[in-house]
Amino acid sequence: MKIKLHPIGTEIAGDPNKTVLQICMENKIELKSLCKGTPSCAECRVKLLAGENNVIPPTKSELGLIGTSYYIDGRRLACQLRAFGDISLDITEHLTKDEVSAKKVRGFQVADRNFESKAVQGTLLLQEAGTPPSSTESSAKGKRNNR
């Protein structure tokens, strides 16, 4: 079983007999938890992104702590979450702002910014310089000029 942690992209091996919180602690991945595994604080919330069919359903005590966030966006308590197959979790709540902003790619990035555009402004469509307009474009120009 593998657990993939987003947005850091780490993939760790897990044991179905251990909770996600225990597995993360063993792999030196820190998740916030005041109660250290006894379901009483709800600080170890994680969002289940994939693998809903590979986890055990939440208990009544877990549902009492996380409330409607389980039904709204699939949040679970890492101290109660046990998986028997591959899952993906969002742990953004447990990362500092520096860790989150370092991992996010914002905007469109171009590898080579030194390029020359060959487009020229024609009618509604841009055509490449040196290329004669197609027959449909020239007939459309002729129709407009005849009016």
Image (cartoon, rainbow, N blue to C red):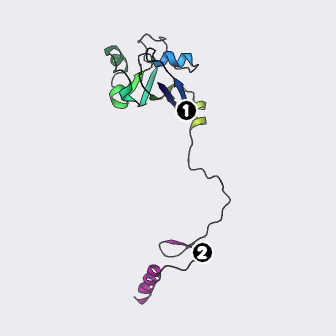
Proximity of marks 1 and 2: CB atoms separated by less than 8 Å: no
Tell me the residue at 44%/28% (across/down): 86
Inspect the image, locate mark 1, and give the three-letter code of the amino acid beneath it. Answer: Gly
Which stretch appears magenta?
Answer: 119-147
Q: Is residue 132 left or right of residue 58?
A: right
Task: From this view, report whether residue 107 is shown above or below residue 25.
Answer: below
Q: Is residue 129 left or right of residue 40?
A: right
Determine which residue is flagged by label 1.
9
Tell me the residue at 46%/81% (across/down): 135
Q: Is residue 73 visible?
A: yes
Determine which residue is flagged by label 2.
129
Identify the element where label 1 is drawn: loop
Inspect the image, locate mark 2, and give the three-letter code of the amino acid beneath it. Answer: Ala
Question: Farthest residue in the right direction?
Answer: 114
Q: Where residue 107 sits in the image (x, y, percent)?
A: 56, 48
Q: Where residue 90 sits in the image (x, y, percent)?
A: 47, 30
Identify the element where label 2 is drawn: loop
Task: From this view, report whether residue 124 is shown above or below residue 42.
Answer: below
Q: Is residue 90 left or right of residue 60?
A: right
The picture quadrant where one finds residue 128 is bottom right
User: N-terminal of the two: label 1 or label 2?
Assistant: 1
Q: Is residue 137 magenta?
A: yes
- Give whichever of 49, 119 is nearer the camera: 49
- Give whichever of 145, 91 is nearer the camera: 91
- Give whichever of 83, 61 is nearer the camera: 83
Quarter of the image where the C terminus is located: bottom left
Q: Where residue 114 sits in the image (x, y, percent)?
A: 68, 59
